[in-house]
């Protein structure tokens, strides 16, 4: 038991993953005294860069590209000065993603949709034309999707009712319910074009045949074209370093080797935390943290039994992740005449059915017969990560958390890593010859580095519509509607003894890094923004028109979805019955009151 005197702060943050650091940084800038506690000797959770192999080779252990967070005002508007004051800098390659097929053919996705269409036209001119329509639709939906990523999700029922108000909304609802495969078959005629976009869905650890995944392609494409894939100069962990610098610049502390054992509750509110070595950290205002739902009940004193049951009932995906980090003696040489210059490279079979059946095997907790390899060699864009003339490799595959042969991952991960490299050699001529040293993280290792990576699931829990917004994200199934991950847990606090005072982080991070934080928007001079009680945007009213004896209200929901509402004379009379003289006076003086 530690004899150290208790530390008191306004805010105590559990964990130094990017979710906790972003929230802590905003609070520190707002004048709160913040203390962040990290269980590991290093900071960053899934956003960390370390010398895992040889000195001078800096590897992104988990997240290697920052995608959805680029649309967050944190970075988009540099609200905390991470770029202008704390050294964060990004490279945005023109080719965020590409597929390399085993026979040497390739298909690139550029930030420029016209260039992507030209790539697709190599396989089908009809599909190239279809792609341009998909790209246009993704761009139209992007404001709605982006606005929903950084606020609590809207209630499922209200969202469905909103979508049912227009033809476009009903079409969007249909796509949200479809599998990626079904929708891709509706859109594209060429099997390789279908496989290319199905693998995009697969990066969310879901099969293309999983229902309610089709919207993911629009989310992914919308962000890819609007923002690109951000490669942090110096490594993914530079985002973590900038956030810590911001917190410290505003008087906050970030402490390593402080493993929180429990969140202390007093009089129905979070009063602080206790670490495993007995240190006490008191919180005047709040305890925040992106804590895995399965661990909440064991950490929070007196947690509401129903909420604990809901949290523990959340599901984890069938596909876990295994990665090989390698120091290379030279850059990769792919067995294709085409230039391989993408942030993420998917190594695909020649048959789309092979990819689909691989995901089926994972559903049954078996190994995929054909490894689903993805790779990144970011020293190609950022040479500062390696010694001169050298390179790094980040290689990943999907596997069962529990091996079907009953063997331990600790005993077999080296063997499986070698299997991955042998398969990669079908696509890359100088693998494994250029590998100087490799570090392999199995699903069990993932879980050890961060409790959020439960069973090797880098998204924390399965990104299904019944557990998260719909789509991505995450980056997930998607932000249009959702109950993240259950109704009480989808708000930003967790009931302790029936009171919502213990705070969770807004959204768990994933491979691509979204990050929490408010989005500040203003309606135009001739528009009216209607907000929910907690400040979230419900509707932007663009016009008020007479429609016979009714008032027609036109606007948009989430900044993109058309919404028309009608106030009839009967409804107006009913509304007047709700007004007292005092309330009528308040309404008349409301335009002249301070905001």
Image (cartoon, rainbow, N blue to C red):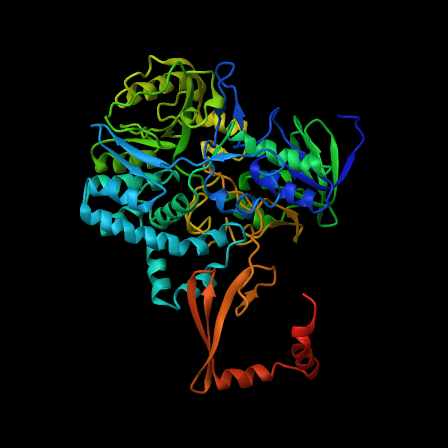
Q: List x then y, in percent, for residue 436.
A: 41, 12
Please tell me whether residue 419 is drawn above or below residue 241 in the rendered image: above
Identify the residue at horizontal 35%, vertical 36% (top origin): 97
Asked if residue 155 shows in the view, the reply is: yes
The foreground one among 207 and 530 is 530
Can you tell which quarter of the image residue 292 is in?
A: top right
Please tell me whether residue 572 is drawn above or below residue 79 in the rendered image: below
* Left-right relation of 200 to 68: left
Identify the residue at horizontal 50%, vertical 19% (top origin): 52
Task: Classify the position of the C terminus by image quarter.
Answer: bottom right
* Left-right relation of 43 to 109: right
Q: List x then y, in percent, for residue 59.
A: 48, 23
The foreground one among 118 and 401 is 118
Q: List x then y, in percent, for residue 102.
A: 23, 28
* Left-right relation of 521 to 31: left
Asked if residue 314 shows in the view, the reply is: no
The foreground one among 508 and 109 is 109
Task: Classify the position of the N terminus by image quarter.
Answer: top right
């Amino acid at each position: 038991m530690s004899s150290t005197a208790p530390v008191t702060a306004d805010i105590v943050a559990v964990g130094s993953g990017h979710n906790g650091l972003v929230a802590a940084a905003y609070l520190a800038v707002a004048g709160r005294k913040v203390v962040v506690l990290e269980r590991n000797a290093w900071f960053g959770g899934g956003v960390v860069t370390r010398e895992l192999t040889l000195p001078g080779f800096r590897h992104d252990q988990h997240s290697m590209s920052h995608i959805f967070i680029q649309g967050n005002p944190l970075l988009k508007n540099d609200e905390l000065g991470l770029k202008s004051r704390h050294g964060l800098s990004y490279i945005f390659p023109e080719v965020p993603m590409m597929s390399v097929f085993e026979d040497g053919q390739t298909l690139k996705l550029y930030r420029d949709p016209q260039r992507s269409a030209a790539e697709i036209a190599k396989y089908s001119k009809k599909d190239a034309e279809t792609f341009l329509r998909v790209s246009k639709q993704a761009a139209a939906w992007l404001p709605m999707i982006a606005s929903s990523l950084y606020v609590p999700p809207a209630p499922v029922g209200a969202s469905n009712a909103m979508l049912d108000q227009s033809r476009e909304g009903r079409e969007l609802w249909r796509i949200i319910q479809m599998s990626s495969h079904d929708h891709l078959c509706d859109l594209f005629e060429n099997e390789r074009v279908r496989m290319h976009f199905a693998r995009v869905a697969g990066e969310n650890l879901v099969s293309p045949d999983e229902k309610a995944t089709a919207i993911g392609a629009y989310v992914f494409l919308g962000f890819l074209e609007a923002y690109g894939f951000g490669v942090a100069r110096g490594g993914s962990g530079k985002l973590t370093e900038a956030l810590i610098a911001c917190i410290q610049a505003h008087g906050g502390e970030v402490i390593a080797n402080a493993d929180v054992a429990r969140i202390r509750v007093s009089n129905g509110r979070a009063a602080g935390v206790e670490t495993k070595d007995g240190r006490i950290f008191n919180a005047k205002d709040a305890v925040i943290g992106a804590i895995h739902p399965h661990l909440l009940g064991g950490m929070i004193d007196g947690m509401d039994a129903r909420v604990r049951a809901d949290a523990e009932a959340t599901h984890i995906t069938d596909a876990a992740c295994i990665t090989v980090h390698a120091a290379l003696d030279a850059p990769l040489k792919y067995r294709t005449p085409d230039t391989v210059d993408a942030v993420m490279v998917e190594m695909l079979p020649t048959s789309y059915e092979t990819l689909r059946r691989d995901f089926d095997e994972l559903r049954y907790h078996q190994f995929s017969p054909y490894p689903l390899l993805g790779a990144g060699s970011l020293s190609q864009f950022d040479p500062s990560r390696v010694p001169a003339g050298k390179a790094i490799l980040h290689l990943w595959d999907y596997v069962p958390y529990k091996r079907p042969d009953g063997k331990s991952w600790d005993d077999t991960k080296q063997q499986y890593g070698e299997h991955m490299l042998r398969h990669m050699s079908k696509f890359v001529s100088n693998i494994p010859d250029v590998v100087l040293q490799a570090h392999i993280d199995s699903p069990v290792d993932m879980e050890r580095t961060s409790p959020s990576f439960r069973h090797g699931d880098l998204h924390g829990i399965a990104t299904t519509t019944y557990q998260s917004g719909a789509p991505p994200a995450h980056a997930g199934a998607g932000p249009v509607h959702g109950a993240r991950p259950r109704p009480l847990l989808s708000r930003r606090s967790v009931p302790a003894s029936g009171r919502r005072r213990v705070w969770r982080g807004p959204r768990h991070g994933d491979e691509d890094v979204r990050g929490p934080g408010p989005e500040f928007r203003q309606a135009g001079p001739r528009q009216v923004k209607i907000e929910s009680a907690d400040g979230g945007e419900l509707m932007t009213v663009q016009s008020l028109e007479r429609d016979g004896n009714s008032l027609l209200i036109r606007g948009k929901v989430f900044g993109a979805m058309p919404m028309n509402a009608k106030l009839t004379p009967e409804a107006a009379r009913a509304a007047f019955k709700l007004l007292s003289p005092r309330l009528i006076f308040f309404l008349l003086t409301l335009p002249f009151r301070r905001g």
